[in-house]
Image (tube, grey):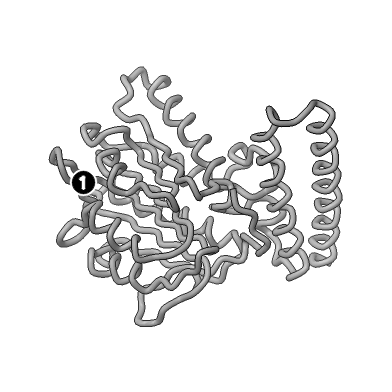
């Protein structure tokens, strides 16, 4: 896992233009619904993810949403090509809609020619940084082998390309991005790992409550160089409702690094004696508590 000293919350996002944008970047695409009900649902879900990105403290001109007639292959590829990311940056793609799989090729259904998993992968291969691809469509499992890479966290709504029924995954992904129940560590920042845990549980519950045989099962593939906890999807609670000072943002970045160190400590537990483990754990928990107190004071001071 990589430690990042910068503020994860201060994310610059992706725009479709001739200008090359730097720093961490994100693109949301709402595909074709095929009928009015699906189209309305996909558009609403894409907008909910867009609003969640704004809750990270981003300006509206920093968030790019492509849906309707704008969600073309040309625009998607142009958006990806415009990215000038460094190795420490984070790039996110959220794709919502229908997909198809013919046994060999996956396609994301959009206005005009559909875009294939191969085309997405080739475009992203030219982009540096850690990448999150959330492909929330029917048949999306058929894209996994093509999309996965060491620098990518790839999430697909289905396990195979043969699961072709309409997926409900994106419904709960968009829903969970604004709910405290998805915030497992209660730091008011919902990471990709936390949101995936929430979404997969809700998808399972949906089929059970409806008395249906599940027609989808998601995949979650983490590249060797990727830490899924460092992809932030949204802020909730006090963090979402506050305009944070640079000092508060810096403290939140410090807290994120401590949380990564806690995760790393858990992974090293078998290598340590019990005394070593609990001594390190106590130090990190104390550091985390003191940082949280400072964050709370900065937010309170900024709201006065």
Q: Farthest top residue?
A: 211
If the image is split into quadrants, where does the C terminus sit?
Answer: bottom right
Image point 75% across, 31% down: which residue?
A: 272
Q: Nearer the viewer, residue 266 or 166?
A: 266
Q: Is residue 209 above or below residue 76?
A: above
Residue 203, x across and y down, in percent? 42, 31
Image point 37% across, 74% down: which residue?
A: 82
Residue 255, x across and y down, in percent? 74, 53
> Quick one: label 1, few (<14), some, or many (20+) residues within 10 Å?
many
Residue 44, x across and y down, in percent? 40, 52
Left/right placement of residue 42 relative to residue 101 reads right
Image point 25% across, 46% down: which residue?
A: 98
Q: Farthest bottom residue?
A: 18
The residue pinned by badge 1 equals 106
Image point 49% across, 74% down: which residue?
A: 22
Q: Is residue 104 above or below residue 242?
A: above
Task: Determine the image quadrant of residue 299.
Answer: bottom right
Task: Determine the image quadrant of residue 249.
Answer: bottom right
């Amino acid at each position: 896992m990589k430690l990042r000293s910068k503020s994860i919350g201060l994310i610059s996002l992706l725009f479709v233009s001739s200008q090359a944008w730097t720093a961490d970047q994100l693109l949301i695409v709402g595909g074709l619904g095929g009928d009015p009900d699906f189209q309305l649902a996909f558009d609403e879900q894409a907008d909910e993810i867009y609003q969640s990105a704004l809750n990270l403290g981003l300006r509206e001109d920093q968030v790019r949403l492509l849906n309707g007639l704008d969600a073309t292959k040309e625009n998607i590829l142009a958006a990806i090509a415009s990215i000038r990311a460094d190795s420490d940056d984070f790039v996110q793609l959220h794709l919502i809609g229908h997909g198809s799989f013919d046994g060999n090729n996956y396609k994301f259904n959009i206005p005009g020619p559909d875009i294939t998993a191969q085309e997405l992968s080739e475009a992203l291969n030219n982009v540096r940084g850690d990448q999150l691809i959330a492909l929330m469509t029917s048949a999306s499992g058929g894209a996994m082998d093509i999309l996965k890479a060491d620098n990518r966290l790839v999430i697909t709504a289905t396990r195979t390309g043969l699961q072709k029924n309409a997926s409900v995954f994106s419904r709960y992904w968009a829903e969970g991005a604004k709910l405290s129940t998805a915030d497992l560590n209660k730091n008011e920042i919902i990471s990709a790992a936390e949101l995936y845990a929430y979404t997969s549980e809700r998808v399972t519950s949906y089929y059970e409550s409806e008395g249906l045989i599940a027609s989808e099962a998601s995949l979650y593939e983490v590249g060797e160089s990727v830490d899924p906890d460092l992809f932030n999807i949204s802020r909730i609670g006090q963090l979402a409702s506050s305009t944070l000072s640079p000092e508060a943002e810096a403290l939140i970045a410090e807290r994120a690094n401590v949380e990564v160190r806690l995760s790393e400590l858990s992974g090293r537990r078998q290598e340590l004696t019990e005394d070593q483990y609990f001594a390190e754990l106590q130090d990190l928990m104390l550091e985390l508590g003191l940082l949280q107190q400072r964050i709370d004071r900065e937010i309170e001071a900024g709201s006065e």
